[in-house]
Image: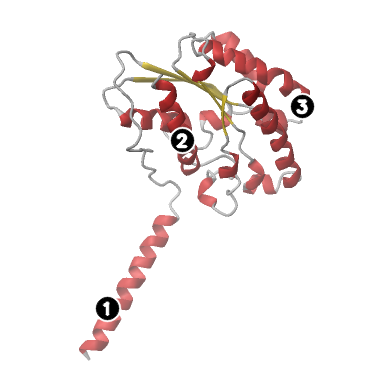
Amino acid sequence: MKASIRIIVMIFCFAMTTSCNSENSSMESEIIPPVTNPSLELPTQSKTIKYLALGDSYTIGQSVCETCRFPEQLKKSLKNLNQENNFSLEIIARTGWTTSNLISAIEQQKPVTDFDLVSLLIGVNNQYQGINFNVYEKEFPELVNKSITLAKGDKTRLIVVSIPDYAYTPFGQNYGNPNSISTEIDRYNAFAKSYCQNNGILFIDITDITRKGLSEPKLVANDGLHPSETAYALFVERLLPKAVGILNK
């Protein structure tokens, strides 16, 4: 009889554990620990380290919390490497912006030109809005040059980030032809990567992360389109070592 009771209790405990795990996994937001790497070091700076993030919805973090977007996560991860440092983050980005919109915003806002680190992620809305590709061919290099100017005129302080592929989201699966979307995104990224390589500019590819959005739904925000906090954390895993290298110059 005691053995039977013990078995019943074990079954009940397992059921409760499974239920709790299931409930936790279905939560809309999960706590993402800041990216840390014990092999990375960031010496104490005597001044505030200034980071500028340029882009569109992927930079402003559409549909995720303010501290969930990748520039905020990157700033926090850098801060965690040396708590003595002070960091400032400025973002020039808005959902729906094309290369033309970003150029106009930079010209209007006239940011200072002494940033220690600049990131640039732009182009998805050129593709989404069906703008002729030659506009990107003309304006992407212009944005790169503007970004370099803002980074103390030092091209090694700039990180260009590839365009995510929204075809691998619920929205993308129901919008047009997902295969065509991916092909066009590849074209944009290939141009940007080639331009960066030919001009000695750092290019970080994160597109493959977003292409897991259908097999790993946690990588997609609740709007069914944009990257989630979890996806942005994976972006930062790739960006952090490069950012540290830049700031250690």
CB-based contact (under 8 Å), mark 2 and mark 1:
no
**The C terminus lies in which quarter of the figure?**
top left
Residue 99: quadrant of the picture = top right
Q: According to the image, label 1 marks what residue?
A: 9
State whether residue 83 appears in this view: yes
Q: Helix or strand or loop: what does disc 3 sit on?
A: helix
User: Residue 128 in the image: x percent, y percent?
Assistant: 71, 33
Residue nearest the observer in this picture, 141 or 219: 141
Q: Position of residue 160 (x, y in %)?
A: 57, 26
What distance separates the C-alpha of mark 2 from that of mark 1?
44 Å
Amino acid type, residue under disc 2 in the picture: Val
Residue shown at the point (60%, 52%) measured from the top left:
214
Q: Earlier in the sequence, mark 2 or mark 3?
A: 3
Q: Which residue is mark 2?
A: 236
The answer to which of marks 2 and 1 sits earlier in the sequence is 1
**Mark 3 residue type:** Phe
The amino acid type found where label 1 is placed reads Val
Tell me what residue is drawn at x 37 percent, y 29 percent.
78
Q: Can you tell which of label 2 and label 1 is closer to the viewer? A: 2
| Labels 3 & 1 near each other (Cβ < 8 A) | no
| Above or below, 10 relative to 62 | below
- Distance from disc 3 to disc 1, alpha carbons, whole Å, reads 65 Å
- Report the front residue among 232 and 108: 232
Q: Which residue is mark 3?
A: 133
Left or right: residue 229 versus residue 226 is left
Residue 224, image x, y percentages: 59, 45
Task: Find the residue positioned furthest to the left.
Answer: 2
Q: Disc 2 on helix, strand or loop?
A: helix
Q: Residue at x 77, y 27 (%)?
A: 133
Query: Residue 100: in sight, yes or no?
Result: no
Q: Is residue 211 left or right of residue 10?
A: right
Residue 200: percent from left, percent from top: 59, 21
